[in-house]
Image: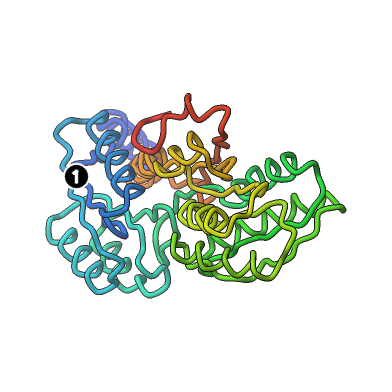
Amino acid sequence: MLRMLALASAAALALAGPASAKELKAIGVTVGSLGNPYFVALAKGAEAKAKEIDPKIRVTVASAEYDLFKQFTQIDNFIALGVDLILINAADPRAVLAAVKRARAAGIVVVGVDVAANGADATVQTDNTQAGEISCAYLAQKIGGKGNVIIENGPQVSAVIDRVKGCKAVLAKSPEIKILSDDQDGKGSREGGLASMQGYITRFSDIAGVFTINDPQAIGSDLAAKQLGRKNIVITSVDGAPDIENALKANTQIYASASQNPYAIASKAVDLGIAIMNGKPPENPVVLIPSQLVTRDNVGEYKGWNAPR
């Protein structure tokens, strides 16, 4: 009797076939600010991947303007809309946890993009340690492996900390390179880079190279050097932003930037979200997108932030 029941159950399962895959029908994307071309490119990457999968997928993009409470409201709106997947560039990676929990309790997969979001199913971001490594390896090469170097630091978020860590690891391989300063916060902005570099030039008479944690600081640092008449400084950074493309093609002291790829980050996040929806989470919940070095020599072939590479 038991054998007959077992056979009947097996037959029923065979007739039912494998469980059908869950389809992605709607995505919500909330980013720091759509006034930043980086996040515009990230949104485009998500939309392009969604339309590639199915033109009928709805993609709703919201700009949090770096306001945590505004981002809370956006996530609640996504829950009300019944989206299947939320991509979140967290305004505050820790404090966003409550909203992420609400989304996941509603059966929505949440993937952090660019920075981690507490409680998210996974995160996709730039390999910031590698970005710092390749940017500073190029700097070391351009100054011949010796001389005084400044690491122009920034806000102490994980991305910045990792970039500086990667840079220091590479520079440590050149014993004739001396780091004059590595703890000043350039605020992640052009104005912060300008002010920081003005201070460095006033304090130090001999500077061979400067690594800045992002492109706005690099552009501000270059401007300070120009205003104060200091030449023969090699500046490298991280981002690959549109402004740095122009700087690399112009008469500046900026020589390279380790590029991020927001388009690819969003595209990967959508793929990852679908996999998680269907019970296939990644082995490592943090997926790193490698950086590519953009220099004066190859900037002409660089596709930038707004296209797949």
Say if 92 sits above or below 277 in the image.
below
List the single residue furthest toward the right: 175
Q: Nearer the viewer, residue 20 or 47?
A: 47
Splitting the image into 4 quarters, where does residue 107 fall? bottom left
> Residue at image x 43%, y 53%?
114
**Could you tell me if residue 234 is visible in this image?**
yes
Amino acid type at circle 1 is Val
In this rendering, would 271 be left or right of 116? left
Q: Nearer the viewer, residue 217 or 83?
A: 217
Say if 128 sits above or below 4 in the image.
below
Q: Quadrant of the N terminus?
A: top left
Q: Nearer the viewer, residue 13 or 248?
A: 248
Splitting the image into 4 quarters, where does residue 94 fall? bottom left
Say if 228 sits above or below 21 in the image.
below
> In the image, residue 92 lies at what x, y percent?
38, 70
Q: Nearer the viewer, residue 223 or 235?
A: 223
Q: How is the image coloured?
A: rainbow
Helix, strand or loop at disc 1?
strand
Q: How many marks?
A: 1
Q: Quadrant of the C terminus?
A: top left
